[in-house]
Amino acid sequence: MTRTVVESKTKTAVLGFDEPFCVIGERINPTGRKKLAAELEAGDFSTVEKDAVAQVLAGATVLDINAGVVYNSNPNPNETEPPLMRKIVELVQGLVDVPLCIDSSVPGALEAGLEICEGRPLLNSVTGEEERLEQILPLVKKYNVPVVAISNDDTGISEDPDVRFAVAKKIVERAADFGIPAHDIVVDPLVMPVGAMATAGLQVFALVRRLREELGVNTTCGASNISFGLPNRHGINNAFLPMAMGAGMTSAIMNPVALPITQKKIAEKKAEVEAAGIILPEGMEDEAFVQMFGLGSTKPRAGKEMEAIRAANFLTNNDPHGGEWIKFNKEPAKEGEEGRGRGGRAGGRRRRA
């Protein structure tokens, strides 16, 4: 069976048809996150540090690292991204020891990440465009790493799943010309929003089956694309992920963390409770309040998508005897007890000085 191996200095993650689903944490990415982008330009990596640890604690088995900031002081990403990528990769692998996914549209940034990364990272990504194939496949071969292959080419993203399959097949064949085996190609068949295309889910399930059966490759996707623009996106994502797994998908680039509830929402709910004449215990902590009213948590925690994935792993016997499911559903450690017995941090290594 196809096995795609990615490694950190001390840990291995395997993508495979008979392996637990691989969650690639997407949070270390400034795209659409103005606050994070501004922090990175200012040399502030505090959010990166928090996101790295939170994603691993929530269950991510690989972390995606994207340094795609367009600096106000220098809009040329070919100059700014490579050094920023080096810095983030070095920082993150000093905090957690899961394998990394080096993610950029800038070839220089990809190589910068590969140069500094310990182990065997996943490279994100190559497309079917001729220029991109000639730029990226030599890097994949040189560093002996697996690569995400996105099913679009010079003509753009096709709504026809047969065309997207043909692009994936082309990339696998071109990779073979460079001596890159199919088990090191992880195809992203491109998930369309179901709100814009009613057959989007059916398309991707059929595509994943074809990619598995005809090309023998592992697959991934941007999981949240399926629910873009719709209400209750988590509900759609929670249904989509197990169905995609059932079709043969072996990983997803996604957010494993349920973000903390904001102080604004807590204040709004407290006002609503007060207006209803409900008297709360004096000195009640915010965490107890939000738990009482089912608002979530004041702290980052594993999201509902992770619950769906872990349940699906159990049901497909990729969690033998349900050990991970049972552990996932145990009471969380109390504040101050996280990481005990593992060096005091997610993953167990000490942070480098």
Image (cartoon, grey):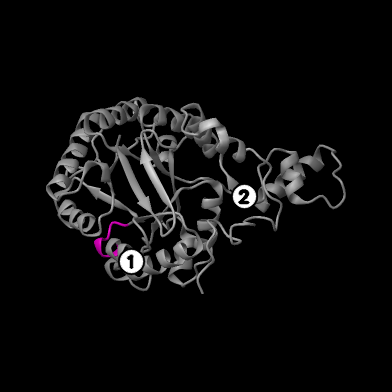
Highlighted magenta segment, given as a residue range = 104-109
Q: Position of residue 334 (x, y in %)?
A: 71, 52
Disc number for residue 260: 2
Distance from disc 1 to disc 2, alpha carbons, whole Å, reads: 30 Å
Q: Position of residue 100 (x, y in %)?
A: 40, 55
Query: Circle 1 is placed at which residue position?
Result: 81
Say which quarter of the image contains residue 250. Answer: top left
Closer to us: 14 or 52: 14
Label 2 residue SS? loop
171 versus 75 height, above or below? above
First reached walking from the N terminus: tag 1 or tag 2 = 1
The residue positioned 24% from the left and 50% from the top of the image is: 126
Say which quarter of the image contains residue 10. Answer: bottom left
Q: Position of residue 60 (x, y in %)?
A: 48, 47
Closer to us: 248 or 323: 323
Circle 2: residue type: Pro
Dot 2, crowdedness within 10 Å: few (<14), some or many (≥20)? Answer: few
The residue positioned 18% from the left and 34% from the top of the image is: 166
